[in-house]
Image: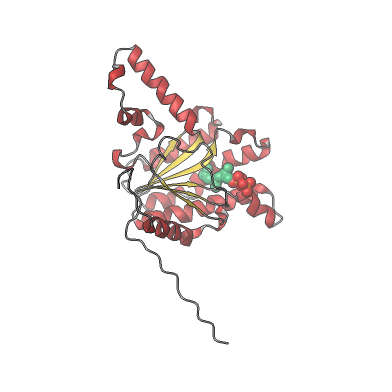
Amino acid sequence: MFKFRRKKEFILEDIPNHIAIIMDGNGRWAKKRMQPRVFGHKAGMEMLQEVTIAASDLGVKVLTVYAFSTENWSRPQEEVKFIMNLPVEFFDQYVPRLHANNVRIQVIGDVSQLPEATFDAMERAREKTKHNSGLILNFALNYGGRADITHAAKLIAQDVLEAKLNPGDITEELFSSYLMTGSLPYLYRDPDLIIRTSGEQRLSNFLSWQSAYSEFYFTPTMWPEFKKEGLLEAISEYNRRQRRFGGV
Ligand code: FPP
């Protein structure tokens, strides 16, 4: 019997400026292969590099990735230790290639709570790539959406207390500049598209404020298997949707 497989066509007319990804399913992917969970995180880190290069080639401006949430500390200590060491490995092994691709690395989250080696690796990467003008790879590390909003409220309260700001001047736009994403280029602060792998369909305290008008894309694919095709598929689906921002 003759089998004809039609090549998949992707619609890539409108490339989202800011894509955010919840890289979920590393543990389950590893378990299916009779491997320890950390094996999945390592594979996940490699996938992150592949997807970053693909996004950069497509002209995406910001890629925010949920690498560690404020809730992830409750995982077994050994796993937390392993994940915390990933940035160290990532920046030694992968940053040179990302740097060569003009990628700039930034971080959001409470980095003051990170182990020293993790913090130092992040700082090195940020410093090394700070003059790059290409895609911003924005790591959410020890990040939580509610913590982000609470932190912004504290900063605003402090500025009001010091008479640098009048309560009447607090607008949504001003509030957004106090959020951890406030240092991103103004037009790309909020994600256009949020992707979550592994079949789960929730936000899990990721970019709570910033996601108000984002499109959501959920796929059953586990993160270590997402690949460039996964990204193209997600963007293609994004292109099939019409964003109206509350209008008609
Ligand atoms: C979620 O999968 C994944 C994480 C909590 C860690 C994600 C980290 C990476 C992909 C590597 C990031 C790279 C750097 C440089 C920090 P899960 O463990 O919740 O999987 P499960 O739902 O199957 O258990």
The quarter holding residue 3 reads bottom right
Q: Position of residue 123 (x, y in %)?
A: 44, 35
Residue under the point 45% across and 70% down: 8
Residue under the point 42% across and 34% down: 209
Above or below 51: residue 180 = above
Q: Position of residue 197 (x, y in %)?
A: 54, 51
Q: Nearer the viewer, residue 156 or 46?
A: 156
Q: Position of residue 35 (x, y in %)?
A: 69, 53
Above or below 110: residue 223 = below
Above or below 20: residue 10 = below
Q: Nearer the viewer, residue 135 or 87?
A: 135
Is the N terminus in the top left, top right, bottom left or bottom right quadrant? bottom right
The residue most toward the front is 248
Q: Is residue 206 visible?
A: yes
Q: Position of residue 146 (x, y in %)?
A: 48, 30
Residue under the point 30% across and 27% down: 171
115 lies left or right of 75: left
The residue most toward the bottom is 1
39 lies left or right of 178: right
The residue most toward the right is 34
